[in-house]
């Protein structure tokens, strides 16, 4: 010390060399030395001598001056605020580089200031300012150390100051100071927590509540302090959860963004509260504000990708909630949800746990792709990119459950995902892994999800097919122009325009897509043509299609309508769902893996080209000695062939020897296969083989089936399989079946139905067993019901291509079948028509189960024959069909109603498909059949006491009316007489039994009767059930059902002649609806309304609904009269809207 003192004495005060050194470290060290020497030379405080007190003040002032002198950016000083300026300078001189050396001196001086100075608001603000800055610094650490050292004297000032800031409009700085104090000096910040709680629930201060939520989350996330805070002050967490449902969107958004940090902080210490926070964020997915939903999606994805928290597992419900946002009305939310789910897919597929959850998320992602790709605009492009990523990056990594085991029990080689930049020597195990992944995924989906992915498969397949057809048309046009030469007129390109228009229907959201694609296909540059052809080739692998797509995008460029159209086509046509290689692996392993077989059947249903393109593999499977494998191949071909859709035979390119071997194998399956196997084998013979090879084999099959029936009377299942195969032959190849029809009809009607047969098949009772009221039928009756069903199916041809029509023998057999079925629709079990079935039980009981099973089979068969031979059936059969619907049991009625609805939907679709060029008689036949089915649905649905059936009937009628309106313009352009059949704003043909009923009065008679006595005579029994159904549904607030029946389609203009042609029919319907008396139901004393007051209220509601029905009809009549009078008065009326 003496040596140091001796050296320092040599430095005079006038010597500025040391104090003005350039290096900051030298200057700081010098200041520290001077301060320490002053401290060492001065006596200990307190000083009693006045001179020594002056020495202490001099020491402090010199220290202050030195510190201010060393401040690199000294603030402007004021005489009245020197202490505050010095404190700020003292805090600003400490930084990361000199913290270790300067910190003791700074803490000593700060402590001296706090102990000796009067603590004013300005000085306290200066002292706490480092705590309020955004980033932590050595100065803030020093302030926390001073507060911790002088808690007794400084804490009250700090608490009052921060409480005042929180009670006013809180700032981010005050919140930061609170968090940093609670982290370092929790004893000082604990009294401030009630003020923070007041901020979280303060009304009218939305920014303050948002800041409070952030501060509460930060406090709960502090290591150690957060756990004690949950124990000692749980109110803070409860208030934070309440902010998830705050009334201000910005508060909800800020709170949702805090979820990942909150879950990470709470997971290790309180898993239950972490789950509560995750649940609160999940509820924000349904928030009405778009930004809050986006924040919630991002928060949940971040939590899920991070594996939730050590103590808080991922809730599977959050996965489903994220998937729901894929249908959000805002594109940004939909895209964020898709990207988030894809991120979860990658994170979970790369791990070795949560495999079931990863599979579920992947399924939901693919469903999002199905909805988006079939959508428009940016959604389609986004989901196409998601699909490509799902297919090519990371989801097909071989999990332990995917890796095949060797014979010695060891695991096989690990298969990696199919990367687009993988080498050409990529192992085949990757495609096997992908096929197995798809099989597992397909097995985990329900029917609705499978249909959603199936629609996407069909969309991609159809888009590639149409684009490929357009490319081939362009190539033919190019070749024709080259052959014609330069001096001749160019061949017309109408075919090319038609093909391109068909392809652009699927990407109609792209502006001017048709012009862009036409320009591309007409250009002289062959590069886009080659790339499109390679992309749409049915034989292209995923690698080849990906390269072709990249080439197409490169050629198209980055901007312009042409580039946009080509980009849309390229993104949506990539065959990645699944890849062609995975499809082949799936078919190869379908015989041994049930899930692979289910996937193969799904592919055959929704993407037939993917299955039928492997004709060689399918033929080998059909020729297999394994019966199960052969029947699976037959089922795949039958489903992929499209149920008789006209497409080239699958096996026409096979060598003749293989064709004959395949036909022989199919013949054996037809004669000796199971029920389903024989059916699919017959369909495969009809649709997969060339006509010459298939017809000869089918004739042999038909003769063989009839010959085998007498030898199979002891085996019910075998008998059922043979007759089912014969029925399939009649439906799929009526030309082959027609010569055999009389023999087959006589075999069943005269022989099999009169025998005692062994019942070894599923009974109709089990098919209909949805309640205890419908039990099992006897085995003998069950088998005979199946035989009756097979008989009627044989006479209901589905594929009439190449059939010239039924001959006399066929029609005679059909009439016999109709007569047999019509007798079995009786509601009297004692009818002699049931004698051949050997009913068990009391035949005088109207609810005999055996009789009910036979009656249901007969009515369903009559509906089947009605759909196939509607023009040949008399009114009697239509009446029997209507009467047969009224069964004692509710289950048969529900099933029959479903069959009628499906038949009506198909008829409506066929009506929508009517275009110019369709034969007039065929169009009339289709629409008349739909009208009769609609009438049956109206009357039968109205007579059904079940409200669900009534509602279903009305929904089906509404869909039928809307479909008919869409088909009206092409019919008007084609045939005026056909347009009369489809009134544009009155449901004439739905009420077919009224409009064409022979007992109904004429419209003029109805009008005159209403004028004379106001109560015209009408056959109420005809329309009463239908009006009662409308009346009951109107009680439930479904007036729209009646509105659809009686109001015009929006935006349609009708000619005056059309209105006058239909005015009589419209008036007829309105009068009948207006004056049809429907008795009020007796509801009092029933189980639904045991109280008399409730029953009177229900009766009043029914009377009110009938009044609304009368009002609608009266308004309709008044409008109709005015329209008719105006059209009559004006000699040249214009179009009427």
Image (tube, rainbow, N blue to C red):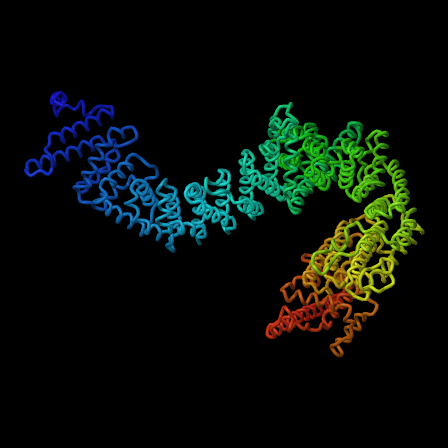
In-front residue for pair 489/151? 151
Front residue (pair 61, 880): 880
Q: Is residue 285 left or right of residue 791?
A: left
Foreground of the two, 533 or 451: 451
Query: Residue 33, relative to residue 816: is it above or below?
Result: above
Image location (x, y in percent) of residue 646 = 80, 41
Q: Quadrant of the C terminus?
A: bottom right
* Whole-percent x, y for residue 216 in the image: 38, 46
| Numbered circles on residues, count | 0
Q: Position of residue 859 (x, y in %)?
A: 80, 58
Residue 42 visible within the image:
yes
* Relative to 458, residue 1028 above or below: below
In the displayed structure image, the side of residue 230 where residue 853 appears, left or right: right
From the viewer's side, name the closer residue of 961 and 77. Answer: 961
Farthest residue toward the bottom?
A: 1013
Q: Residue furthest right?
A: 808
């Amino acid at each position: 010390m003496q040596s140091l003192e001796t050296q320092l004495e040599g430095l005079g005060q006038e010597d500025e060399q040391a104090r003005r050194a350039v290096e900051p470290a030298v200057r700081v060290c010098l200041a520290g030395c001077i301060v320490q020497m002053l401290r060492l030379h001065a006596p200990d405080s307190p000083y009693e001598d006045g001179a020594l007190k002056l020495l202490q003040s001099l020491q402090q002032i010199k220290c202050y001056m030195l510190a201010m002198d060393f401040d690199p950016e000294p603030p402007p000083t004021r005489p009245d605020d020197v202490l505050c300026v010095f404190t700020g300078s003292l805090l600003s001189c400490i930084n990361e580089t000199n913290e270790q050396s300067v910190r003791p001196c700074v803490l000593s001086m700060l402590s001296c200031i706090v102990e000796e100075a009067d603590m004013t608001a300005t000085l306290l603000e200066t002292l706490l300012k480092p705590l309020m800055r955004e980033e932590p610094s050595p100065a803030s650490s020093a302030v926390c150390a001073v507060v911790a050292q002088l808690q007794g004297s400084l804490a009250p000032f700090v608490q009052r100051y921060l409480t005042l800031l929180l009670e006013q409009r809180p700032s981010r700085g005050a919140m930061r100071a609170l968090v940093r104090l609670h982290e370092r000096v929790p004893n000082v910040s604990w009294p401030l927590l009630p003020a923070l709680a007041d901020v979280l629930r303060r009304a009218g201060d939305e920014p303050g509540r948002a800041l409070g939520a952030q501060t509460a989350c930060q406090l709960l996330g502090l290591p150690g302090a957060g756990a004690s805070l949950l124990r000692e002050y749980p109110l803070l967490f409860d208030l934070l959860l309440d902010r998830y449902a705050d009334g201000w969107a910005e508060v909800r958004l800020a709170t949702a963004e805090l979820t990942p940090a909150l879950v990470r902080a709470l997971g290790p210490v309180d898993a239950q509260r972490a789950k509560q926070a995750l649940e609160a964020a999940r509820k924000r997915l349904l928030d009405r504000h778009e930004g809050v939903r986006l924040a919630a999606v991002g928060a949940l994805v971040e939590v899920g990708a991070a594996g939730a928290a050590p103590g808080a597992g991922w809730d599977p419900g959050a996965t489903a909630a994220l998937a729901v946002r894929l249908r959000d009305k805002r594109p940004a939310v939909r895209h964020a949800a898709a990207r988030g789910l894809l991120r979860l897919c990658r994170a979970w597929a790369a791990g070795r746990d949560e495999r079931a959850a990863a599979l579920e998320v992947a399924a939901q992602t693919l469903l999002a792709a199905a909805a988006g790709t079939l959508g428009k605009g940016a959604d389609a492009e986004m989901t196409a990119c998601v699909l490509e990523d799902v297919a090519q990056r990371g989801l097909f990594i071989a999990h332990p459950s995917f890796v095949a085991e060797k014979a010695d029990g060891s695991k096989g080689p690990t298969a990696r995902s199919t990367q687009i930049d993988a080498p050409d020597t990529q192992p085949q195990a990757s495609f096997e892994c992908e096929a197995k992944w798809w099989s597992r995924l397909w097995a985990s989906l329900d029917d609705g999800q499978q249909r959603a992915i199936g629609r996407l498969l069909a969309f991609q397949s159809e888009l590639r097919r149409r684009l490929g057809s357009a490319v081939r048309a362009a190539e033919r046009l190019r070749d024709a122009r080259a052959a014609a030469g330069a001096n001749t007129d160019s061949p017309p390109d109408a075919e090319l325009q038609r093909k391109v228009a068909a392809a652009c229907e699927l990407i109609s959201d792209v502006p001017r897509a048709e012009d862009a694609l036409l320009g591309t296909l007409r250009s002289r540059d062959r590069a886009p043509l080659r790339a499109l052809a390679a992309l749409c080739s049915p034989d292209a692998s995923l690698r080849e299609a990906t390269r072709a797509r990249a080439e197409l995008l490169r050629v198209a460029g980055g901007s312009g309508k042409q580039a946009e159209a080509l980009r849309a086509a390229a993104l949506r046509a990539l065959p990645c769902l699944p890849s062609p290689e995975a499809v082949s692996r799936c078919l190869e392993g379908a015989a041994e893996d049930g899930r692979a077989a289910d996937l193969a059947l799904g592919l055959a249903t929704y993407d037939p080209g993917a299955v039928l393109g492997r004709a060689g593999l399918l033929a080998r499977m059909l020729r297999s000695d394994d019966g199960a494998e052969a029947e699976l191949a037959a089922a795949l071909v039958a489903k992929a062939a499209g149920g008789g859709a006209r497409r080239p035979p699958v096996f026409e390119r096979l060598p003749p020897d293989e064709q004959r071997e395949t036909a022989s194998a199919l013949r054996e399956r037809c004669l000796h296969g199971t029920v389903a196997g024989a059916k699919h084998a017959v369909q495969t013979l009809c649709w997969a083989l060339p006509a010459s090879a298939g017809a000869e084999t089918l004739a042999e099959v038909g003769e063989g089936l009839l010959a085998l029936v007498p030898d199979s009377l002891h085996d019910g299942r075998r008998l059922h399989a043979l007759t089912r195969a014969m029925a399939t032959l009649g439906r799929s190849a009526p030309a082959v079946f027609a010569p055999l029809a009389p023999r087959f009809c006589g075999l069943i009607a005269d022989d099999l139905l009169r025998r005692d047969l062994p019942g070894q098949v599923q009974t109709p009772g089990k098919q209909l067993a949805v309640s205890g009221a419908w039990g099992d039928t006897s085995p003998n009756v069950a088998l005979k019901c199946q035989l009756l069903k097979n008989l009627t199916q044989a006479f209901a041809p589905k594929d009439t291509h190449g059939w010239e029509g039924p001959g006399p023998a066929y029609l005679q057999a059909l009439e016999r079948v109709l007569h047999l079925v019509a007798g079995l629709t009786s509601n009297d079990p004692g009818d002699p028509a049931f004698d051949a079935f050997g009913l068990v039980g009391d035949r005088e009981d109207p609810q005999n189960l055996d009789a009910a099973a036979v009656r249901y089979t007969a009515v369903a068969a009559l509906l089947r024959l009605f759909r196939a031979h509607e023009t040949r059936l008399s009114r009697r059969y239509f009446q029997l069909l209507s009467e047969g619907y009224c069964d004692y049991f509710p289950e048969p009625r529900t099933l029959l109603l479903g069959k009628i609805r499906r038949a009506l939907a198909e008829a409506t679709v066929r009506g929508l498909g009517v275009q110019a060029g369709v034969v007039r008689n065929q169009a009339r036949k289709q629409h008349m059949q739909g009208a009769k089915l609609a009438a049956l649905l109206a009357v039968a649905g109205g007579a059904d006491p079940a409200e669900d059936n009534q509602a279903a009937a009305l929904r089906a009628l509404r869909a039928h009316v809307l479909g008919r309106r869409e088909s009206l313009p092409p019919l008007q352009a084609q045939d005026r007489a056909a347009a009369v059949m489809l009134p544009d704003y009155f449901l004439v043909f739905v009420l077919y039994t009224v409009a064409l009923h022979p007992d109904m009065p004429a419209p003029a008679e109805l009008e005159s009767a209403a004028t004379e006595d106001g109560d015209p005579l009408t056959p109420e029994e005809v329309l009463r059930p239908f009006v009662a159904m409308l009346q009951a549904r109107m009680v439930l607030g479904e007036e729209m059902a009646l509105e659809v029946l009686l109001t015009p389609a929006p935006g349609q203009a009708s000619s005056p002649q059309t209105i006058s042609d239909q005015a009589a029919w419209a008036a007829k319907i309105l009068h009948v609806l207006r004056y049809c008396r429907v008795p009020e139901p007796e509801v009092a004393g029933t189980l639904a309304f045991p109280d008399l007051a409730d029953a009177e209220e229900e009766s009043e509601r029914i009377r009110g609904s009938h009044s609304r029905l009368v009002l609608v009809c009266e308004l309709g009549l008044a409008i109709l009269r005015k329209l008719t009078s105006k059209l009559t008065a004006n000699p040249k009326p214009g179009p009427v809207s």
